[in-house]
Image (cartoon, rainbow, N blue to C red):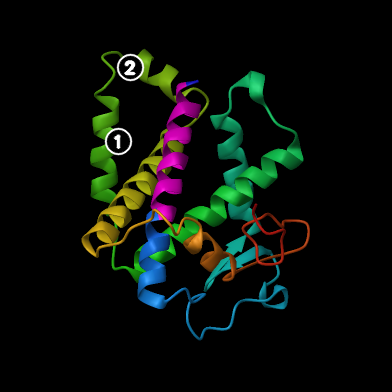
Amino acid sequence: MYGSSMLGRALRCVARVMACLAAATFIAACGSDGGDEDPPAISDIPAGAVAIVGDEVVSKRELERRIRAVRRSQVQSRSQSADGLASQAMALLLQQIAIEQEAKEHGVGISEREVRRLLVRTRRQFKQAEDFKRFLGRQTVQDLSRQLRIQALADKLADRVREDGGDSKDLIGTLELRWRERTACRPGYVVAACRNGRAPG
């Protein structure tokens, strides 16, 4: 239960930063889909990979690791089908990569030291080791570190957008569409975040 709550908070934070960045992207690029770069095509996806996000290749092995992580984050009573689990894992993985690449474009990053500090701070919220174990549920410390990292990166991105005068009130979804244009997925692994998938909404 606690592990799922942490994942939910991270996802809500990601959604907020995607909305904030939408405004900054629109202001800076006048609504462009990312410049003069040619979007990736299915034919560009190498063997052993399931997608391309920008210039980053997503391997099948990485997707399988994320599926296992998503499975660990779920409470037993809410377990999904194999297809549903794979789709959720794929969507989360593509979203994370898009945020990381957007952060890179904005000159925003987070060090391993910062992530370790966040992990220590999280551990200190629990007086007993057993309480922390219950918080994790079936998740690993590595799963939690990944969630803390993407949440902190999203926070930093939101701060950078606010510093640049960004406003997300009327432009929610612009960034999501921008990165969708930069994402190609192999058939059988297509989700809404893929440009060859069904458009959101």
The residue segment tinted magenta is: 2-19
Residue at the image point whose x is 32% and y is 57% from the top:
157
Quarter assignment of residue 71: top right
Q: Which mark, residue 139?
A: none
Residue at the image point whose x is 24% and y is 65% from the top:
164
**Coordinates of residue 186 in the picture (x, y in percent):** 73, 64
In the image, 99 versus 175, the foreground residue is: 175
Instruction: Determine whether 174 is above or below 1 in the image.
Output: below
Specify few, some or many for label 1: CA neighbours under 10 Å numbering under 14, 14-19, or 20 or more: some
Residue at the image point whose x is 25% and y is 33% from the top:
120
Q: CA distance from mark 1 to mark 2?
A: 14 Å
Q: Main secondary structure of the magenta part?
A: helix
Instruction: Determine whether 174 is above or below 42 in the image.
Output: above
Query: What element does badge 2 sit on?
Result: helix
**Coordinates of residue 75 in the picture (x, y in percent):** 58, 22
Q: Are marks 1 and 2 in contact (CB under 8 Å)?
A: no
Instruction: Determine whether 95 is above or below 184 in the image.
Output: above
Q: Which mark, residue 129?
A: 2
Residue 4 placement, left or right of 41? left
Badge 1 is on which residue? 119
- Residue at the far bottom: name it: 36
Quarter assignment of residue 99: bottom left
Residue type at mark 2 is Ala
In the image, 63 versus 150, the foreground residue is: 150
Residue 16: in magenta span: yes
In the image, 74 versus 12, the foreground residue is: 12
Residue 77 placement, left or right of 109? right
User: Which marked residue is nearer to the observer: mark 1 or mark 2?
Assistant: 1
